[in-house]
Amino acid sequence: MTFRTGAFDFWQRRVPRGSTTARTLPFNRRRSSSPCAVVGAALLLVTGFGQVHADVLPQNRALLAFKREQIALAQQYQKSYGGVAQPELEAWVRDGRRRAQQIENAQGDAGTVSLAAPSTPFSLQERAYFAANDNSPQGYWVSLPRDYTPTKKYPLVVFLHGYSTTISKLSPWILDVDTLDVATKLGMIVAMPYGRRNADFVQWGEDDVLAVKRECLRVYSIDESRTYLTGTSMGGYGAHAVGLHTPGEWAAVAPISGRTDFYVWFKLQRELLPDWKRLLFDADDPRTLIENGRSTPFLAQHGADDITVPVEHSRLWAADAARLKLPYLYVESPDVGHENGFQMPALANAIRWLNEQPAHSMPLTVSMTSGDLREARNEWSQIDAFANYSQLARLDAKIEGNAIRVQTRNVARFTLTLKPFALGTVNLEVDGKKVGDFDSTQPLVWSAPDAKTAKSPTMCGPFKSLMRGPFTLVYGNDRDRKDAQKFATEWNECADGVAAIKSAGAVSGGDKRDRNLILFGTRESNSVLREIADKLPIELKSDGYRQGTEFTPAKDVGLRMVWRSPWADGKLVGVCSGAWWGDKLPLNHKWDLLPDYTIYQGTKYDRDDTNTPIIAGNFDGDWK
């Protein structure tokens, strides 16, 4: 794709009909020019991308920051060619600067400029927003019918892309003309999130999808009851995962060639895993969460000869759906695999099918399985606390007249929001026991007698939750600083953002109040960590570790931990001490298998390439 205003016809010439992606810059010609190869130098250039002139209109600031980051990255790519002229890159930098100037001087919404040539049947717009967790500008692209008017409501399709070793903010995954034309002829808007590069569309990848949806609802005239989700390959998995984490957000979901079972994918025996690790897999596993979509139509498509994501994934999912009598459809195509020749026609079929699905309406019955309190919500129900944070929780709720019947497993607290149903006074029954009468115009909150509720959906583990809210890396001495910088590099490589880094002496009261702080070092090296060390349930020492009041001698070990912030409700604190975690793990999966806490060996690894744990697990609902 080219970002030169009015030059989308160049993109059309370069992209074969039916191709999945659009690329105009030669970023994959040399190994040294891959996105992660230039990240270190580019970081130095773009750490101030969120700072734009005060005169720039608020709605244009994120797009300007995004454009400046693209320019900085393009300049680094130029350098990676060792002085050999790259006319196309040089032209892009010139045009990128002109476009940045246009955005900076715009008197209205600069995102309305179309990147598509007038001959195309749709308008293609590049937009961006500032991510809530790291304030990085994240781009997304929107296809609009040429006759789009804000006086009409349009359905929205959110498309999630596949895995790519060369994807970057300069070379994003944009659908081809033919596929976008299918949506255009149906009068549909298509949004294409960047998805934090290759983040599997879970955690911060999922947050990106939901942020793009919110941005589209804010900017465009969209029928909120007709928002749809689809994706191919990695994006097919993402459609499963996001659709089952947030089923009330979508009128229908259409995954293509997506994996559905982590245990099949990684060849694991579920029953042999410790509870805490099994839960980390289950929390994002589509087959585990399959009943969450009971009220959401799903269409899955897969090629029978797929060897990249074996068709077994969709067959198992379809068998589960049939057994559970879920409203899911499965289409398997013979003699095709994972190639675009199958996926693009399948995507066109998915778009047509999505357009035929009815608008979303609130169901009278919900089912919810969750392993992560942040994602324990479905339509009008939310689990606020688990009883055991190393086990899945389950909630089934049904409205029958003015009676609400709820069945739970491993649920300590839940909230039902029944106001949209206008039920008046309702009678609540939980696990076969009558609880009482409640005013349905107010949130209905139920708690078990022994509920521990210090953890909440906005303040809970596992470790990766630290990076889903605003966070800052805090170092003490020089070694701590290097560790914080290494973490920041891993964050950029994984999530294509820039982590804020501060010395312990520079941390303010506002930082403690408003941000999750990830502390590097020990109480001896980091003064902020020293403030809270005596309160922490686990601590690394120079010659071992403390768990509660018990000390265990140990060498070459590390600690990763998330805990409640002692400074602010709703915030978290992380601790990274000792030996490094995850050197053998792939870039986009560094923190997937970290529970609330683990003391691990620095140079010994399990078969899944995680560091071998000495102790590991999750804190209870009171962070103990």
Image (cartoon, rainbow, N blue to C red):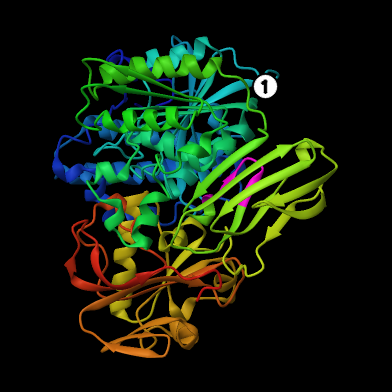
Give the residue at mark 1: 150
Residue 261, percent from left and from top = 33, 41
| Image-based side of 155 in relation to 177, left or right | right
Q: Decide whether residue 378 is among the magenta residues.
A: yes
Could you tell me the amino acid type at mark 1? Answer: Pro
The front one of 512 and 271 is: 271
484 above or below 116?
below
209 above or below 557?
above
Q: What range is drawn magenta here?
A: 375-382
| Image-based side of 7 in relation to 311, left or right | right
Residue 420, percent from left and from top = 76, 37
604 above or below 120?
below
Residue occupying image coordinates x 52% and y 35%: 293
> In what element is the residue under mark 1?
loop
| Image-based side of 618 in relation to 493, left or right | right
Residue 112, percent from left and from top = 55, 27
Residue 57 appears in the picture as rendered: no
Circle 1 packing at 10 Å, graded few (<14), some (14-19), many (20+), is: few
Residue 275, percent from left and from top = 37, 61
The front one of 512 and 313 is: 313
Query: Farthest residue toward the front?
Result: 432
Q: Quarter of the image containing the N terminus?
A: top left
